[in-house]
Amino acid sequence: MYHQDKRTYTTTTDLSNSVYKETTKAIKNGLFSINYCNSVSVNVSFLFLIMQLPLKKLSSILLCLLLFFKNAEAQKIYFDSLNHLLAQNSISKEEKANVYCRLAKANFEKNLPLSFQQANEALKVAEGLRDGKSKAMAYATLVHLYVWKKDLKSAYASLDSAQYYAQKTKNRIALGFVWFRSGWLDLVNDENDKSVPKLLKALDFFKDQHADDYESTIYHYLASFYGYGNDPSKQQKYARLCYSSALKSKQVDLLNNAYFTIGQSYFDRFKLDTLKRNLLDSALFMYKKSLRLSKEQAGRMLTYSNTAAAALNTANTYFQYFPASYRDSAEKYVDIAMGIATKTNLLEVLLNCYGLRSEYALRDGNYDEAEKILLTGLDKISGVVVKMPLTQARIYQGLANIAEKKGNQQAALKYFKQYFNYYKKAFDEEKINSTVRIEAQYQSQKKEQEIAYLQQQTKYTKKLNVFYIISGLTGIAALLLLLMSYNYKLKASIRKQELIDQEKKAIELMAQLKEAEAMQLQTEQVLLKERQERLEKEVLVGNLQIEEKNELLELITEKVNPESHLSLDEQIKRIVNQQKKMDKVFEEHKVDFFDANPAFFERLQEKANHALTRLDLKYCSYMLMGLSNKEVSVRLGIEPKSVRMSRYRIKQKLGLGKEEDLNLFLQQLG
């Protein structure tokens, strides 16, 4: 039984007749069919030559041409539609990168260099995008291409880049695709324990994202992991899911893959118990169903590796488990496998086909034919770039066995040497691949550890930043509380100070009020004293006037001259008028005198030790008023000599010397 890659083919559970019914219904409803109306242009001269052929041949040729052009046109339309999208100016960079990835996926079997070119174009287009989705998808696509190129080192490097850019996107499909390729790469390197958790994680990302195509493929690989008798129940479970997801995706390649997976499931279960021939019949039924779908929907098929494997496994089943009468059936499917392998460059499938034909020749005892078939197979791969030392070693081992059976020991030795050389190459290549794989895994794990460390650092930095932010906010809150507390205390202190100030002002106002009351009282006392003094002065002045009047009356008798020519009345009137003038002058000066010198007479008496008489005070008042001795003598009606004598007596009472001026003293005292 041939397996192009034992990880590539899985199985599913017993789907019985429902698989056939559901698929038939889907195809009838157009889910897996193509209806194109594009016309096919054919050269006129070519048509003319065809018209000359007999009707039977013509119909056969036309049927073949129709199928060929239909399939070619269908594939051409698929690629043209993608290229048409690229030519549109309105397409976004993200969509453009996605189209390049789809083209790379579609071309990898037929034109691997073109697939690399298209994947690299996707990277160039995604160069300016901030989101890492497109770059993650492109690098994950390169992982698949490098594995086909058998360049594991570059595959792991591309995976590292895909994982790096996957961290820069939240797109679940991109994240799931990267995890899918990571798990697939582990599966290629027989690291199943690492692969399965990654594939399951990819399924978690694809959940509810309508990514049925990716889910179907992952279920296919999970089924392959549990195949070969490892866990038949899980193999059937994932095969069932592979089939149901393929139906939802409406993609012919995935449905073809699901059919092959189901067939492999039946075959693996049959190998556990070869007595259950119904399982072998079911396996052949699903293999043939896959081949029939590939033929009917050839125009929509992009990958043919599973179809070639299904054909080869069908032929091998007829060879191993059926009588020799079924040889025609085996050769039929070998021809199908060889045709697909030749077109799609599946060299290992091609060599296995030659190996199966050689086995039939050996059964017939035709050793030369068996040897010729194997040598033809080796000749087919002689010019290829990709070497297959292990497969070639097995071919030379078969040739050595054939030569030995023929009895040609020299040829057997020659072939055995070739077997040994190619086996050594295969061993060396495996060592190199293992070294490269281990180194690539080491670098990948190292980068993963670096990325994990950076992520931890980022998380720590984020936590530290959060801590700083919380600390800062706490500090700000504490500072605000302190400021609020300080502000409250400040306001309370200001309020308290205001109350103290108000109390002080109240006390000051009370003191000022008391002081004002005291000053008012003092002022009132002064006013009362001044009023009393004024009254006393007025009384004194009045008394002086009365005394003067009395003295005037006493003097009138003395001043009247009986001998004067004037009559008595006239003399009296003259004396009275003169006295009035003096009273008028006195009245004009007494107000100013007594207003300006309220305590004059008190101080005067103090100076004289209260020895001054009323008449002395009268003289002093007249002298203070500025009256001359003559004016005083006239006013008092006495001789000026008497006035001078009175001044002398007053000076003695006041203790003044002869040279001292009494008028000046009185003015200074007043």
Image: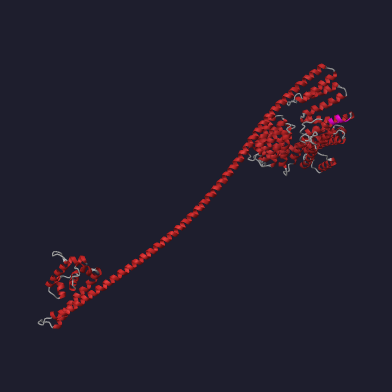
Q: Nearer the viewer, residue 394 or 559?
A: 559
Q: Magenta region: which residues? A: 315-322
Residue 70 in percent (x, y) is at 79, 37
Image quarter where the C terminus lies is bottom left
Residue 478 falls left or right of residue 260: left
Residue 646 in percent (x, y) is at 14, 71
What is the quadrant of residue 590 in the picture? bottom left
In the orientation shown, which residue stands out farthest toward the left?
563
Assess whether residue 255 is covered by the magenta stretch. Answer: no
Q: Is residue 70 visible?
A: no
Q: Is residue 9 visible?
A: yes
The answer to whether residue 636 is above or below residue 435 is below
Q: Nearer the viewer, residue 50 or 568?
A: 568
The answer to whether residue 280 is above or below residue 557 is above
Residue in the picture at 81% in, 17% down: 411
The answer to whether residue 669 is above or below residue 303 is below
* Prevailing SS of the magenta stretch: helix
Image quarter where the N terminus lies is top right
What is the quadrant of residue 16 in the picture? top right
Residue 429 falls left or right of residue 582: right
Residue 584 falls left or right of residue 348: left
In the orientation shown, which residue stands out farthest toward the right?
325
